[in-house]
């Protein structure tokens, strides 16, 4: 359908679904006034249309008049109210505006649709810990079904930043530190959420990968800070996940970073937004400004002297739509075009891109929410089961001395202690009710009826009061096992909503840290519990790696759960009591201290010392005088309740030309007594190269399931893209020389020879 004026007489070309999209875009653009075009480059908040619980006609007329709008932030309400509000606004846009252009309704979908009553999956860093792209794709598809049913058409996800500084509060939003792991999980997420076709159907959403580019590695770990690096880092580290998102997965939108790279803010960076994104990669979607990013060119980065100049810079660089309000793309842009200071062709180009995505998303045929489907889909039992399954694979067993885990569910007395034991932490970018399962709830549901579970908080997340220590120590001393659940709290603490009580937050967007130790008195609490002599399990529920050297040495069992989602308490209990064998692996390195940052695994040969005489306080050394430069737990680490043996690593052929393929095979056997899943990780090292290359880089991985005694041959194929480097002249080349392949502690080699 189209607006009342456009609908007079016969249907216009842009209204005909049978016509090619580009023809429809050109026809509609030609009918638009300059004011209507610029309005398509802006966003409004659906919540602002609601008065006394409903969208009113007066508000619609006052905020919209006869002009449509580019995007709407979704209402973030429970499904019936959200669907009703969205439909009321869309109906006005379609029936009462001059051309009847519907809005793209957008929402956050980082680990579930950010709305009341939606399913909350494990936070993104937990999704990465599964090392399971197929599972991540299923989760993304479930999220898309829930969001599309209530009228959302575009997701501001996934986050493809590389988390190479764990001090940053947004580590939890990422898939970790490695470009290849981030790339593969990002592609899986987009395929699940957006679908595999060239158009987006009623079960899927337009995806908006973010934050383009390098935003996850800020100076001093501080959000929005500059990112250090040059063209080589940009091309080899930060761009590959985004390139795969655009060129392989076909993402139709993109969000630039708030930060700057080499002195140019991403929101005004023509190299990123035009030359690379569009001219090199052929991106056909539209660029969505992060909230307030255009204004920051004036108020924060100081590259623009006023709002108009900020808008001009962003548009010229390749920005298409400004959120959340018209700072640089509203009246000031209209004035600049009128004065001839901004070519109207730049506006037409931006609007063309936005309209193209609207047509591809099918909004002109059906822009409405489906309340009846939403009632069946949102937080369905199938999605609840999926949330638990994902959490089970996201949890990592970091340490298990003496096989303390799994525990017997028939213990006589069990102490559950800690600031995160009796709350469920949803993680940042969540808006939900307090229905999640806490660790305490999950443990109580998993043990026998005869088991007494004693709870004591012990201390707060960051508070410095020891009032609860005595009760916690007494509970541990009188129990057979003590489970201490420590960690942090993100912006969304269950029951309070998103950002409503920032006093509780130790992680999340803008909550960065100068230390990586557990906040407050939590380390001291763990020491006090361990001193009772009761076998102690530490569970970490948080959004960034913690440096816990004392615990790593003295606590027999340590479990990393990140923010495990609404079913996290049950999933944690499934792991603790052996119902599920842990299979998660670290997607990010855990450093020994904040002084060891950066600690990422794919460092250069010269980056971890020259003298190789690691020191200790008792015996000072060199490189670091009082500590080794090695991490506490390495990227890719994760234990199981069974054991896996690797053998027969073979590489064929042993010699090849630069354009050739390498076949790698390895035997993996479950040598323990339990069925389990193992992540087979293949790393590559270019032994001698014309420019320095990392000591190793992840190039392939797969997750396999093996029964006790079962053996499987795992095969990988490597090609030129896996062997290439960016040479001194900025060219991608495969150089002759030796390459080492590393899988499961085994090493084999092959040689590339000149043509």
Image: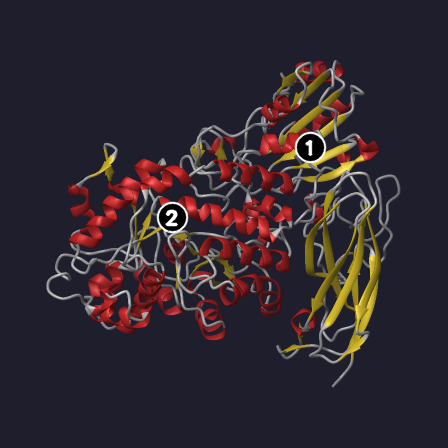
Cα–Cα gap, marks 1 and 2:
35 Å
Q: Is residue 173 visible?
A: yes
Q: Can you tell which quarter of the image residue 477 is in?
A: top right
Q: Residue at horizontal 39%, vertical 51%?
A: 291
As drawn, the label of residue 158 is none
- Is 745 on the left-hand or right-hand side of 153? right
Q: Secondary structure at mark 1?
A: loop
Vertical order, 741 against 709 (above or below): below
Q: Badges 1 and 2: C-beta atoms under 8 Å apart?
A: no
Q: Can you identify the residue that label 2 sits on?
A: 148
Q: Residues within 10 Å of mark 1 (few under 14, many from 20)?
A: some
Q: Can you tell which quarter of the image residue 356 is in?
A: bottom left
Vertical order, 635 against 383 (above or below): below
In this rendered view, identify the residue nearer to me: 10 or 598. Answer: 10
Q: Can you identify the residue that label 1 sits on?
A: 579
Vertical order, 182 against 336 (above or below): above
């Amino acid at each position: 359908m189209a607006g009342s004026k456009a609908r007079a007489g016969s249907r216009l070309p842009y209204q005909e679904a049978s016509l090619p999209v580009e023809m429809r875009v050109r026809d509609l653009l030609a009918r638009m006034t300059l004011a209507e075009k610029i309005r398509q480059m802006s966003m409004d908040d659906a919540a602002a249309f609601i008065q006394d619980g409903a969208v009113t006609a007066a508000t619609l007329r006052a905020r919209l008049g006869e002009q449509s709008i580019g995007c709407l932030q979704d209402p973030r309400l429970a499904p019936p109210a959200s669907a009703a509000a969205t439909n009321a606004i869309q109906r006005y846009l379609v029936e009462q505006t001059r051309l009847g252009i519907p809005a793209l309704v957008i929402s956050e979908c980082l680990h579930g649709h950010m709305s009341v009553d939606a399913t909350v999956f494990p936070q993104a860093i937990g999704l990465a810990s599964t090392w399971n792209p197929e599972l991540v794709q299923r989760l993304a598809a479930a999220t898309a079904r829930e969001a599309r049913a209530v009228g959302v058409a575009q997701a501001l996800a996934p986050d493809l930043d590389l988390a190479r500084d764990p001090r940053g509060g947004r580590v939890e939003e990422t898939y970790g530190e490695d470009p290849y792991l981030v790339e593969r999980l990002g592609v899986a997420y987009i395929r699940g959420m957006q679908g595999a076709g060239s158009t987006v159907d009623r079960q899927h959403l337009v995806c908006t990968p973010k934050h383009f580019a390098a935003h996850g590695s800020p100076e001093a770990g501080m959000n929005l800070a500059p990112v250090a690096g040059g063209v080589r880092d940009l091309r080899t580290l930060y761009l590959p996940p985004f390139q795969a998102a655009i060129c392989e997965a076909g993402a139709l939108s993109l969000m630039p970073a708030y930060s700057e790279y080499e002195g140019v803010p991403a929101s005004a960076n023509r190299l990123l937004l035009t030359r690379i994104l569009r001219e090199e990669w052929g991106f056909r979607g539209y660029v969505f400004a992060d909230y307030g990013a255009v204004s920051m060119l004036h108020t924060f980065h100081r590259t623009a002297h006023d709002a108009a100049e900020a808008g001009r810079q962003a548009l010229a660089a390749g920005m298409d739509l400004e959120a959340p309000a018209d700072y640089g793309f509203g009246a000031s842009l209209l004035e600049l075009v009128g004065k001839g200071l901004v070519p109207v062709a730049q506006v037409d180009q931006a609007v063309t891109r936005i309209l193209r995505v609207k047509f591809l998303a099918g909004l002109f045929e059906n822009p409405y929410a489906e309340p009846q489907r939403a009632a069946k889909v949102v937080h369905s039992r199938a999605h609840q089961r999926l949330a638990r399954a994902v959490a089970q694979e996201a949890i990592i067993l970091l340490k298990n001395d003496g096989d303390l885990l799994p525990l017997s569910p028939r213990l006589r007395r069990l102490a559950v202690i800690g600031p995160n034991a009796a709350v469920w932490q949803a993680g940042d970018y969540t808006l939900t009710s307090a229905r999640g399962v806490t660790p305490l709830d999950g443990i109580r549901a998993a043990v026998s009826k005869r088991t007494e579970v004693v709870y004591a908080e012990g201390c707060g997340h960051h508070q410095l009061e020891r009032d609860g220590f005595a009760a916690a120590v007494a509970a541990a001393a009188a129990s057979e096992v003590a489970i201490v659940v420590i960690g942090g709290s993100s912006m969304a603490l269950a029951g309070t909503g998103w950002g409503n009580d920032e006093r509780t937050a130790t992680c999340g967007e803008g909550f960065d840290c100068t230390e990586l130790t557990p906040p407050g008195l939590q380390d001291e609490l763990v020491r006090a519990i361990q001193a009772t002599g009761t076998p102690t399990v530490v569970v970490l529920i948080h959004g960034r790696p913690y440096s816990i050297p004392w615990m790593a040495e003295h606590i027999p069992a340590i479990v990393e759960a990140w923010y495990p989602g609404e079913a996290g308490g049950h999933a944690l209990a499934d792991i603790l009591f052996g119902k599920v064998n842990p299979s998660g692996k670290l997607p990010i390195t855990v450093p020994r201290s904040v002084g060891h940052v950066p600690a990422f695994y794919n460092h250069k040969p010269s980056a971890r010392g020259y003298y190789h005489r690691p020191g200790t306080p008792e015996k000072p050394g060199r490189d670091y005088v009082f500590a080794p430069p090695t991490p506490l737990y390495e990227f890719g680490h994760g234990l199981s309740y069974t054991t896996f043996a690797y053998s027969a690593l073979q590489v064929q052929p042993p010699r090849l030309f630069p354009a050739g393929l390498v076949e790698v095979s390895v035997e993996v056997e479950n040598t323990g007594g339990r069925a389990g899943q193992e992540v087979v990780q293949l790393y590559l090292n270019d032994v001698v190269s014309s420019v320095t290359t990392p000591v190793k880089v992840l190039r392939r991985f797969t997750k396999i399931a093996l029964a006790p005694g079962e053996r499987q041959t795992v095969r990988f194929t490597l090609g030129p893209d896996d062997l290439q480097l960016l040479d001194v002249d900025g060219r991608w080349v495969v150089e002759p020389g030796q390459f080492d392949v590393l899988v499961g502690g085994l090493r084999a080699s092959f040689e590339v020879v000149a043509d």
